[in-house]
Amino acid sequence: MALDRLRVYFLTGSLHYYGEETRRQVAEQSAHIVAGLGAAPEIPVEIVHTPTLLDPDGIRRACIEASADDSCIGVIGWMHTFSPAKMWIAGLQALQKPFLHLHTQYGADLPYGSIDMDFMNLNQSAHGDREFAYIMSRLRMPRKIVAGHWQDPAVRGRIGAWMRAAAGAHEAHNLRVVRFGDNMREVADTDGDKVEVQARFGTSCNTYPVNELVKVVDQMADADVDRLCAEYDELYDVVPDLLPDGERRESLRDAARIELGLRAFLGDLGSMAFVDTFEDLGGLKQLPGIAAQRLMADGYGFGAEGDWKSSALVRIVKAMSEGLAGGVSFMEDYTYDFGAASPAILGAHMLEICPTIAAAKPSCEIHPLFVGKREDPVRLVFTGAAGPAVVVGMVDMGTRLRLVANEIDAIDPPGDFPRLPVARALWVPKPDFTTSAESWLFAGGPHHTAYSQAVGLDVIRDFAEIVGVELVAIGARTNAEQFRRELDWSNAYWHLAGAV
């Protein structure tokens, strides 16, 4: 997905009563706001200015047009003047896109010396938006509200974050997850209701026999394999055994053949996310390591051990983060450092951590793997870059889906990992280890997550609201006792919301 192919409609409300001159000014000023927002660095997608909406039929048609436009990921609404909200009922009921209510006005300053009733009639957002907000509340319509002047970078940043969340919801609605094999046997939090995920997100997940993939892998041309191996040689610090004259070069060629086969298989299906499991490898010579890592680096979602929910989530977060600094990866909480002044979490996996989070050039290595009963897999080994991040996981609570998120600070390790043959990241969770861990455990948070140094909790929160799923967030201000009470309230809310 490319954000530059997506767009958001900007709907401006007014009324016939104000006369031709006022209507002309409304249209010009609305277009100026759209142009100013569109040129701002905080805004990631195109904003489309639409004619001023003056009557119920025009409003309904504009909402239907936005809903029918496959490139439209959301709608921004603003009442420049007063716009009687009963006019909006049919349109809002027909709208099937995420909605942001922008509460602003054209000019930033009040012209005390020259203000007259012409100015007052033109600049009526202060009460026009209140009338509009009432009908949205009356209709119980989910939306984002951003209040402030449209030239304020903070306001633009909040609009941009919502746009990224809307892009994530758009991607989720069109996402296909390919599943090679089933969920790892007897594991609970990686499993879930695929029908509920498709009904809520639009994301489909279907299983394909792994040997169907093997057929495609075996068809990859030797010349293409050699070219990809040469790319590995150029991009990574390849260990001597895997170099062209190394004893294990053929293992690198096997890994490259798997990557080419995966790309071809997923491309034919139009899929941007996949999972595998070491319990069902069929005729694959290796568990995909470098292949999974490099596909993630190119924007694909991935989940290990059949964890299709994490694969979808990684892809969605990658789509939301397009164009931003920082990477996004599949991640697993692995082990702890209690000896540090602030206890830290070491995240890793057997093979599949995305190199977009690497602090330095990855090393291309080959090591034994104690599961899978296949040949030693090739993988990229590195340590994640320091900086703020968020980890978010998805679990099926039986009656609903829940996202659990934690703000964290990735840190530079105090020592090297000379014997650790996998990529990893070290972080300190907010607000502290004890509060974070206990809150995560009470929330039923999973052991697999999407790790993001690109988009933060603000975007994740907007995404959850757009798709209508529960989000429980752990951050700098979390109090453990209050968090437990909020879980109880959330349980009650979502039970009642599901019932109605």
Image: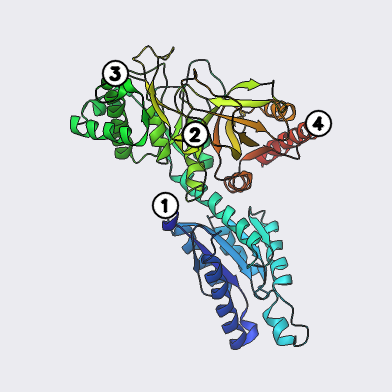
Contact (CB < 8 A) between labels 3 and 1? no
**Quick one: SS at disc 1?**
loop
**Measuring 59% from the left and 35% from the top, which residue is drawn there?**
391
40 in relation to 419, above or below:
below
Name the residue type under label 4: Glu
Q: Residues within 10 Å of mark 3 (few under 14, many from 20)?
A: some
Q: Which residue is identified by label 2?
A: 195
**Measuring 47% from the left and 51% from the top, which residue is drawn there?**
323
The answer to which of 356 and 265 lies nearer the viewer is 356
Q: Earlier in the sequence, mark 3 or mark 4?
A: 3
Name the residue type under label 2: Val
Q: Which residue is identified by label 1?
A: 2
Q: Which residue is identified by label 3?
A: 248
Label 1 to label 2: alpha-carbon separation = 27 Å
Q: Is residue 325 left or right of residue 159?
A: left
Label 3 to label 1: alpha-carbon separation = 38 Å
Name the residue type under label 1: Ala
Q: Residues within 10 Å of mark 4 (few under 14, many from 20)?
A: few
181 in relation to 23, above or below:
above
